[in-house]
Amino acid sequence: MKQDKPDPERAPYDPMPYGPPEVGVGPWPGPWPEGPGSEVYDAGLLAGGDRRNVVDRYRYWTMEAIVADLDTRRHGFHVAIENWQHDFNIGTIVRTANAFLAAEVHIVGNRRWNRRGAMVTDRYQHVRHHPTVEELREHLDGLDDRGGVPLLGIDNLPGSQHLETMRLPERVCFLFGQEGPGLSDAARDACAGTFSIAQFGSTRSINASAAAAIAMHSWVVRHADLTSEEAWRG
């Protein structure tokens, strides 16, 4: 069956280059916003429309205004990923961290990472690089005056606690290893503890980005304010 060519006018991150047009809105109808609060709007988006991968409340906002608003209510958990093999899961983990409003995402190891899976959400999510896991640990230790942020690794290791039954702290950084080898020896040594996700089938492990999503959602279930209007429900 013949397939149409992708529309060259679509954004490069459009996940559906062949079907219906992108989601979003066209040019702002009527007079443009003025007065107090109008500084959040982007003139180019008002004129040309907003087809970005953002929720409706941020339509026509500048990127800087969106980040500033997110910064007023970021959650207390961080996410860190070791990057020694340019793992393609990193982009997906960044996108999920943005969805659950992580405080920061930390890339440990190689500075360059595959951003394709992030769907441009790295523009709105604070992403910090650390050459080694020891430097990540030092950064987390200095974040506040309450003893820092504990670093918990996910790995199916003897002695790991079950994520399903452990008491997740409100301030925490989840550390994930590479797909396949898991956490490096240095990462395991830097962690205050490790946890595993309960599995019942024949596979030895689940995908790293899936594990990260489960861990972040477990934090949300325990600590996030789900009654707030900020909890987007679609």
Image (tube, rainbow, N blue to C red):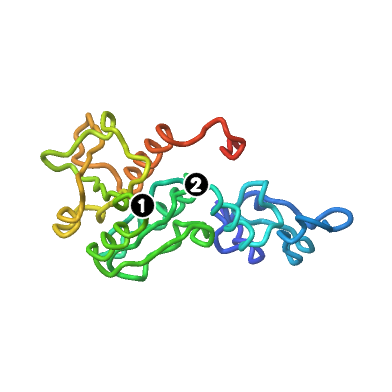
Question: Residue placed farthest to the left in the image?
Answer: 158
- Disc 1 residue type (three-letter): Val
Question: Label 2 belongs to which residue?
Answer: 99
**Disc marking residue 201:** none
Placement of the C terminus among the 4 image quadrants: top right
Indicate the quadrant where residue 195 lies: top left
How far apart in space, not on screen, are marks 2 and 1 (Cα)? Answer: 13 Å
Is 90 on the left-hand or right-hand side of 193?
right
Question: Residue placed farthest to the right in the image?
Answer: 31
Locate residue 68, reporting x and y percent: 59, 58
* Residue at the image position 44 percent from the left and 63 percent from the top: 115
Looking at the rendered structure, the secondary structure element under dot 2 is helix
CA neighbours of label 1 inside 10 A, class few (<14), some (14 to 19), many (20+): many
Indicate the quadrant where residue 177 lies: bottom left
- Disc 2 residue type (three-letter): Ala
Question: Residue placed farthest to the front in the image?
Answer: 145
* Residue at the image position 18 percent from the left and 40 percent from the top: 204
What count of labels does the image hold?
2
- Nearest to the eye among marks 2 and 1: give it: 1
Looking at the rendered structure, the secondary structure element under dot 1 is strand
Is 169 on the left-hand or right-hand side of 11?
left
* Residue at the image position 71 percent from the left and 57 percent from the top: 60
**Disc marking residue 79:** 1
